[in-house]
Amino acid sequence: MYIHSKFLNLSIEEYLQFELESRIRHEYLAGQVYPMREDSNKSKVITSNILIRLRTHLFCTDYRVYSSEMKIRIPNLNIFYYPNISVTCNPQDREKFYKSQPCLIVEVFPSATERIHRNEKLMNYRQLQNLQEYVLVSESEIKVEVYRKNNQNNWFVEELGKEDNLQLSSVGLEIAIADIYEDVRT
C-alpha cells in the first residue's frame, strides 16, 4: 500500500486534526498513518447485530457503546485504532474524539486482514489496562474468538461456532452466535 509522504511521521496532534478534516478514517501507529478499508456489507450487518444487542442491554447504565466512528487510543504505544465496536465504563474516559479505557473491543474482519487483527491488534490492545475482552468475529465464516483477561492478568482464548453462545463477561451479556450472523448473505 502506498502512503503519501505527508502521512508519515505526524504528531498525535497533527493526526487528530487530519482526521477531523478527512473523508476517510485512518489508523495511527507511532507517527505513521494508514487509510482504513471500507467495511463490507457483511461486516456492517454483523457489526449492527452486535451493536444493537449491546446498546439495548446497556441502556441506562454507566457503560457507553461506540461504533467504528470512535477511535481507541493506546497511549503508551502512540497508537489509534478504529474498532468496529468498543465499550467503556470509566467516567474519566472523557476525550471527545477517542477513548483509551475500553473494557470491551469487538473487531469484525475479512480474511484479508485476519493476520493484523489476530496478531498486531491483539498484542497492542492487550496493553490497555481496563480491557477485559477482545472479540474477533470472522465475516467469511461463522467463527468468533474471544480473548479474555483473567484475575492474574493472563489472557486466554475461547473459540465459538454456529451452535455456541458468546458470553461477554465484561458487560454481562450473552448473545447466540446465530444472532450475530442473522441476515448475513453469503
Image (spheres, helix red, strand yellow):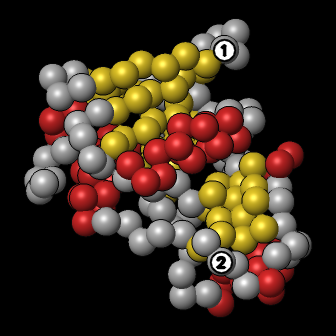
- Local SS, label 2: loop
Could you tell me residue 57's position as x and y percent? Answer: 32, 41
**Residue indicated by mark 2:** 2
Query: Which residue is drawn at the image coordinates 19% and 44% (left, top)?
Result: 181
Reading the chain from its start, which is encountered first: label 1 or label 2?
A: 2
Query: Which residue is drawn at the image coordinates 34% and 43% (left, top)?
Result: 138
* Quadrant assignment for the N terminus: bottom right
101 sits to left or right of 64: right
Could you tell me the amino acid type at mark 2? Tyr
Could you tell me residue 109's position as x and y percent? Answer: 40, 50
Q: Is residue 124 above or below residue 186?
A: above
Q: Is residue 132 above or below residue 124?
A: above
**Residue indicated by mark 1:** 154
Calculate the distance from the C-alpha at mark 1 to the C-alpha at mark 2. 37 Å
Residue 102 figure quarter: top right
Could you tell me residue 45's position as x and y percent? Answer: 24, 58
Query: Which residue is drawn at the image coordinates 38% and 66% (left, top)?
Result: 39
